[in-house]
Image: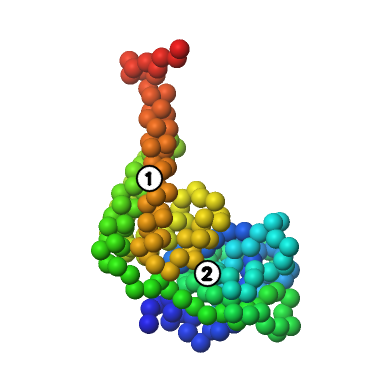
Amino acid sequence: MSEASDIVRGVSELPLFPLAVVLFPGVPLPLHIFEPRYRQMLGDIQAGNSLFGLSYFDASTSERETPPVGSIGCVAKVTDSQALPDGRSNILTIGVIRYHIEEYVDRGDPYFVARVSYFEDEDDDSNAVRENSREVAETFTRIARAVRTINDERAHLPDIAGTEPQRLSFLVAAAMELETEVKQELLELRLTSERLRRLSDILSRAVSGYEERARVHELAKGNGHSGRKIEIE
């Protein structure tokens, strides 16, 4: 049994927080809790296991009130909480494990509660995982380097080459600027190699644009100082 599975062992019902964001296992997510029903939810779970389900749900584009039965979300564990004087709270959560909504249950709570089943990635082709993981790590590092140049950042860039492939896939999916629906699709995939392959395709299409922006940024900074000129016709 994995550490993530152990955390949710014996937990068959989860309070749900429908939100127009996607949470990935192992990735931190800060949240601001202000609605009365979710203030109560926070108090209830902090008195217990500090777990709730975060399900991607955009109420502005849906005719439903809740994420549909069968949809997939990620368990969030509250790791830190700051209560504000007016009853609101700022919390820090981290993704634990994905779940599948089996059915909704009525316990008399003002927030949604669902009976869920949990899952992790299936056994995979180790060669495909290694190759895709290497490509994703290399291309994402190139993009991160370019972004650091564009933002004039001097912080050290961490080496992600040795990151465990499934963890790498979740971290990169969370870090990239992608449509929320695409992130949800990546969350739902059950093969690490497939998630990494999808990410590799996305990154390979994006990297040249980031590196070109970084190059232009460096040229603009040096124009008039380094002797190099940008000619505009």
* Vertical comparison of 54 with 204: above or below: below
The percent position of residue 89, horizontal first and vertical second, equals: 64, 64
The C terminus - image quarter: top left
Q: Earlier in the sequence, mark 1 or mark 2?
A: 2
User: Which quarter of the figure has residue 114?
Assistant: bottom right
Mark 2 is on which residue type?
Cys
The x, y position of residue 140, in whole percent, is 36, 48
Tell me where residue 137 appears, x and y as whole percent: 32, 53
Report which residue position mark 1 lands on: 204
Left or right, 106 with reference to 147: right
CA–CA distance in space, label 1 to label 2: 27 Å
Q: Report the residue at 41% width, 27% height from top.
A: 216
Q: Amino acid at mark 1?
A: Ser
**The disc label shown at residue 74, or none:** 2
> From the viewer's perspective, is the residue at label 1 or at label 2 nearer?
1
Label 1 crowd (10 A; few <14 / some 14-19 / many >=20): some
What residue is at 37 percent from the left and 45 percent from the top? 204
Rendered image: mark on residue 86: none
- Label 1: which secondary element: helix
The way the protein has been coloured in the rendering is rainbow
